[in-house]
Amino acid sequence: MNDTPPVCDYEGSGYRTDFWEGRGREYEDLSERSALRRLLPAGGRRCAHLGAGFGRMTGELSAFDQVIVLDYSRTMLREAQAHLGSGGRYVYVAADIYRLPLAEGSCDAAVMERVIHHMADVPAALRQVRAILAPGASFILEYANKRNLKAILRYALRRQTWNPFDQEPVEFVALNFDFHPAYMARCLAEAGFCTGRRLALSYFRLGLLKERLPLRLLVMLDRLLQPTGQLAPFSPSVFTRNVAVGAHPPAALDGPLFKCVHCGAPLRDEGEAVICPRGHGRWALRDGIYDFKEPLSG
């Protein structure tokens, strides 16, 4: 029985073309790239891009020797593969973030942007992320900020019922959540992370401003305002740089990449499938994508 929380599945969606390409979100894209570059470490062995989607931001991780491009949607992964290529440094994985198949301590960095707002159980998701990271690893997390200026104004004018200052998450559409910065800080600390830098993004995410002001100016102003997030972010989006604290799990960058999602045993790679040596499952490698959404039968 699968007792994990519900997952927002982009399988078969046109997210790339319906939401990003040609949809007037160049400002959001460039401001997010700017923030990610500010927070990423100089480089490393292996970075897990969790909820990578069609690979919009994956190219920013070029300083890492290997990048795990992980998403729940096979459709998104095929688009990422077409964009990034199928050779060498990219490993494509279809998997649920609540049941990550990556070995403990196998990564020295992780990035997750525009993903956790779909998570009904944030603490469970963050525990999974912490488990795959070696001690001292960097985790760049973006989340949708409940305490943003638009929400505060709407609440003051009684145009919305939920309180942006309340620390509990708000689900404004099914599996779409906004989070208070204090709530996210607490969840990160409880999962084993120490939060260092925090950036506030997308203050100018308004159609009228994007239509009237030059893109370069908006991005420049956004970059100037990003450091205000360290004190009190009131922006729609927040980026954080977090460090995995503690000595467990130990670094395992040279060990097997995959583990069994049932028992945690290292998986044996047999070319077209990875196999649990304890007999708990087999998962396919199809067209360059390791598919952990469903085990192979038999």
Image (spheres, rainbow, N blue to C red):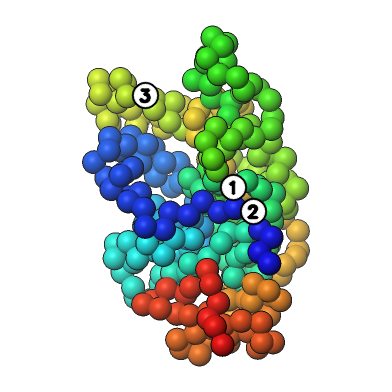
Of callouts 2 and 1, which one flags the residue occurring earlier in the amino acid sequence?
2
Q: Which residue is mark 3?
A: 206
Quarter of the picture holding the N terminus: bottom right
Question: Relative to the observer, which residue lies in front, 193 or 101?
Answer: 101
* Residue 33 sits above or below residue 88 on the image: above
4 horizontally vs 26: left or right: right
Looking at the rendered structure, the secondary structure element under dot 2 is loop
Q: Residue at x 33, y 27 (%)?
A: 218
Q: CA distance from mark 3 to mark 1?
A: 25 Å
Left-right relation of 202 to 109: left
Q: CA distance from mark 2 to mark 1?
A: 8 Å
Which residue lies at the image location 52% right of the left edge and 36% below the top edge? 173
The correct choice, above or below, for 82 with respect to 117 in the image is: below
The amino acid beneath tag 3 is Leu
Where residue 79 appears, as percent x and y from the top left, is: 32, 61
Q: Which residue is mark 2?
A: 5
Where residue 105 sits, quadrant-wise, is bottom right
Residue type at mark 1 is Met
Which numbered circle lies on residue 119?
1
Q: Position of residue 135 (x, y in %)?
A: 68, 62
> Do residues under tags 2 and 1 come within 8 Å of each other at their CB atoms?
yes
